[in-house]
Image: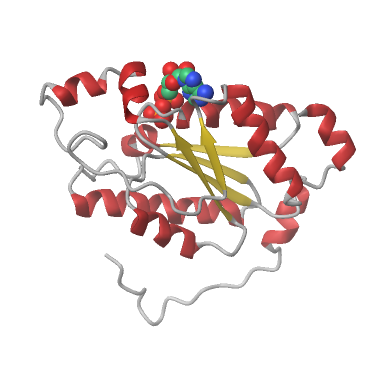
Amino acid sequence: MMKQPPADVVWHPHQVSKATRAHAKGLNTSAVLWFTGLSGSGKSTIANALEQRLAELGYHTYLLDGDNVRHGLNRDLGFSDADRMENIRRIGEVSKLFVDAGLLVLTAFISPFQADRQLVRQLHKDREFIEIFVDTPLAVCEQRDPKGLYLKARTGAIKHFTGIDSTYEAPIAAEIHLKTVEMDIDSCVSAILQYLNDGGYLRQSVSGFSDAL
Ligand code: ADP
């Protein structure tokens, strides 16, 4: 799974660089915003709201959503430990390509294991991987249960469900930490925009951008 390409498969350097493509998209640095958290913590909701705000500001984004990827690229994968790992590895490689294309990539996967997230982080250059911990207590996620999955997990209809009978390893040093019990969706979105702004990711002037916050 982690093997190297054959020796005669050679990487082609291209004339148009990642930085050039990022500039064309209004960015100084393209990056992936990697949302991680329990099911129902708010990853998709916040990523969607953020993507909408970024689109209004004129940014070119791409949102990779867990279930959607499993319909196509990863439809051959199940939920064994090995398949979950391969699922995240492929998503990491896809997000790397989109970052290379000069975009802001948003991903919304539970990605429960520290080692898998670390592997994806290492695929990217410094600053290009922004881990966002959507921190919502299990009891709150279970109460929200937007897809009815916790109910199924509690009754045993779904096995190996994160938070119930499969572990979630919380990030130790996420770039952005969102406590959704204390922050509404708008505040979460603003905190991420602020991070991108303060980190110099966006080429737009700070004053012009602040108005949009
Ligand atoms: P996930 O993608 O992590 O599985 P979802 O985004 O599908 O989670 O579901 C989260 C649910 O929690 C949604 O119904 C959303 O409206 C609700 N919610 C309540 N407060 C917040 C908040 N502050 N941030 C994000 N979602 C919230």
Question: In this picture, is 26 found above or below 183?
Answer: below
Q: Residue 119, how many percent across, how many down?
A: 40, 61
- Is residue 79 shown left or right of residue 68? left
What's the residue at 82%, 35% (across, down)? 209
Quarter of the image with the C terminus is top right
Q: Is residue 123 above or below residue 155?
A: below
Identify the residue at horizontal 72%, vertical 51% (top origin): 199
Say how many tags the image has.
0
Res 146 visible: no
User: How has the structure been colored for display?
Assistant: secondary structure
Residue 210 is situated, as x and y percent measured from the top left of the image, at: 82, 33
Q: Quadrant of residue 144?
A: top left
At horizontal 45% and vertical 35% (from top left) the residue drawn is 135
x and y percent of residue 62 in the render?
56, 39
Quadrant the N terminus occupies: bottom left
Near-viewer residue (44 or 153): 153
Q: Residue furthest front?
A: 182
Q: Quadrant of ligand 1?
A: top left
- Is residue 108 in view? yes
